[in-house]
Image: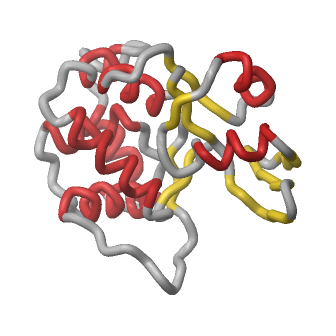
Amino acid sequence: MLYISKGIPRKSSKGKITINWRGREFTLEGAEARLWQLGCFDSSLASAQSLEALVNLSLVETAEEDTPLCLYRLLTNCVICPAPMRLLRWPLRLLEWRILRWIKRAGLRLTLAELVFLLEEGIRFIPELLGEENRQALVECIYNTETITDGILESRMEEAFSRDYVVTAVLDLLRKRRIFLI
């Protein structure tokens, strides 16, 4: 079973870790703490039984298979947020840098499907679509009468050419600790 961890690690000590997820704090220890840490900055494999407690707490998202489509669907269930700046950072590739700019400056929390759409359609990173004051313009750029229905954008972006590139870039940003998932 493929899984990815959600939440922000706050404190860590011998075998224990405290995680903030949507304003609630969870303290994990032992095997649960190790499992959460393994899936924190990458997608990982584990048995369904060992993940049951973390799934019940909503601290992980799971998928049955390890395929690019399952990985896309796994990430569509997560909210992507920029991580606080750190002094030491890994360098970014061009696609990672473009995606991180959208994540940080869009004025709203973009979903994976919306990020795929922005890259697939070649929507330019312009001031008229950035920031909270231009949030509505960005939403109107992404959603129209064909894509506004619940789940349509996610379904269409499943078949997009750039889907796997965006998924890889988002996972790389996660590994480089430039974003986190909630």
Query: Which of 75/22 is in front?
Result: 75
- Please give left or right for residue 80 compared with residue 31 in the image: left
- Residue 3 position in % (x across, y down): 55, 30
Q: Name the residue rendered at 43%, 77% in the picture.
A: 89
- Please give left or right for residue 133 compared with residue 118 in the image: right
Res 149 quadrant in image: top left
Q: Is residue 176 above or below residue 153?
A: below
- Please give left or right for residue 87 compared with residue 52 in the image: left
Residue farthest to the bottom?
Answer: 87
- Which quadrant of the figure contains the C terminus? top right
Counting every numbered tag in the picture gives 0
Res 100 quadrant in image: bottom left
Specify the color scheme: secondary structure
- Residue 136 position in % (x across, y down): 39, 44
Q: Is residue 153 above or below residue 163?
A: above
Q: Is residue 121 above or below residue 178?
A: above
Q: Name the residue rendered at 70%, 25% in the picture.
A: 51
Query: Which of 158/134 is in front?
Result: 158
Q: Name the residue rendered at 30%, 44% in the picture.
A: 168
- Residue 83 position in % (x across, y down): 54, 64
Query: Which of 168/143 is in front?
Result: 168
Q: Name the residue rendered at 23%, 35% in the picture.
A: 164
- Residue 118 position in % (x across, y down): 23, 42
